Amino acid sequence: MESKSAFHELAKAAVMQPQESSLTLMKSKTSIKVGIPREVAFQENRVAITPQAVNLLVSNGIEVLVEAGAGKEAKFYDREYEECGAKITFNTADVFACDIVIKVSFPTPQEIEWMSEGITLISALHFPMLQKELIDVLCKKKIIAICFEYLKDESLNYPIIQCMSEIAGSTSILIAAEYLSNVNRGKGVMLGGISGIPPSEVIILGAGTVGQFACQAALGLGAEVKVFDNSIYRLRRLQNALGSRIYTSIIHPNILKKALKSADVCIGAIRSTQGRTPMIVTEEMVQEMKYGSVIIDVSIDQGGCFETSKVTDHNNPVFEYAGVIHYCVPNIPSRVARTASYGLSNVFAPLMVQIIEAGGIRNYIWEKEGIRSGIYIYKGNITNQAIATKFGYTYKDLELLIASNI
């Protein structure tokens, strides 16, 4: 009994000694306000955040300010945003004064003027149409500007580009089917064949994401598909993704010219990593295509891969050349704005939650490599080499800027 008592006192003394405590360092959540403006760019029908995504943001302590009518063209209405916890404003300037502004198209001069100093802007970049004067103002206001086309996810893929390419690829085949029909002055051909009637022939130029989803859609409708690309790796990857062997070829002019003569549809899905898209199909090749055949030039936003292509819009989407219907609208995903908006929102909403959990945009930029790839201006410094070269700016390394606590 005495030994038990002694042991008790010893244990009590040990508890009273200073102890090492393992502290869990938690990042304190910061409060942020996210602004969703109404798009004013020509025929831009998408919206960056859907009402369902607003509900996710609000439940994570993020205040969301939506400009009245922001989702109207995608058939998301102000009432839906309010029911999900967003605040609706008729004052555009208030939206651009939020901590983070998310929009689809690059901001106009007036929208940049409304921005408060030091905010974060997430939008498209539209590099070919970029103006130095607008970049100057963004730098002057110490904006953190992020181009969503260059954003990367955990696997270092481009989620926005992937999503919009999937939409463009699938939709391009549906568009082709429309313009083969009599309703749209086509030659009255069904894209997929039926019993006893040969299927339509579809040629796809490019075996990237657009080409892959165009191929899947065309095969699903029963068409005969031929895919051309100069990358054996992409052609092999496409066949593996489809799980079947289809006609594939490198882009040899004579082979392509022969294939085009019998084609009913040709989808241009060639992408360029720098500069203009290479012109694959010459005017002579187009002239030898069948009367009433359809060209969908998805690459038109980079100049187009058909020599006969010229930019059209959603109001006047097609023109004819040598009896061949050309569809050359640069912004195909905006044609299905509601679906495309869901795709954008599925990337942006989790991103906002991750930012607030990291304790703010600066912490998140430091932690995540993916978002750093999309930043082209950081607090007055140009951090994108291509923009610096194009406009004669001094390029600054983003990681050094953050490490320097700028």
Image (cartoon, grey):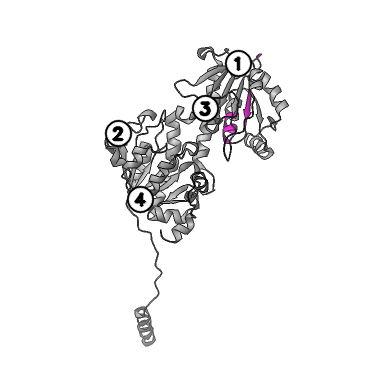
Q: Which mark is residue 322?
A: 1
Disc 1 residue type? Ala
- Nearest the viewer among 171 and 326 is 326
Left or right? Give the position of 45 relative to 292. left
Q: Distance between the residues labelled 3 and 4?
A: 39 Å
- Disc with the residue nearer the chain's start (3 vs 2): 2
- Nearest the viewer among 114 and 219 is 114
Vertical order, 9 against 368 (above or below): below
Which residue was labeled with disc 3?
171
Left or right? Give the position of 44 relative to 229. left
Which residue was labeled with disc 2?
68
Residue 23 image position (x, y, % from top left): 39, 67
**Residue 97's image quarter?**
top left
114 magenta-colored: no
Q: Distance between the residues labelled 3 and 2?
A: 29 Å
- Nearest the viewer among 109 and 2 is 109
Quadrant (top left, top right, bottom left, bottom right) of the N terminus: bottom left
SS at circle 4: loop
Q: Which residue is drawn at 54% across and 48% down?
A: 156
Q: Distance between the residues labelled 1 and 3?
A: 25 Å
193 magenta-colored: yes
- The residue mark sitting in front, 3 or 2, is 2
- Disc with the residue nearer the chain's start (3 vs 4): 4
Looking at this rendering, what residue extends furthest in the right direction? 254
SS at circle 2: loop
Quadrant (top left, top right, bottom left, bottom right) of the C terminus: bottom left
- The residue mark sitting in front, 1 or 3, is 1
Looking at this rendering, what residue extends furthest in the bottom direction? 2
Q: Residue 118 carries which label?
A: 4
Q: Residue at x 45, y 32 (%)?
A: 339
Vertical order, 165 against 255 (above or below): below
Q: How far apart are marks 1 and 2 (CA)?
A: 46 Å
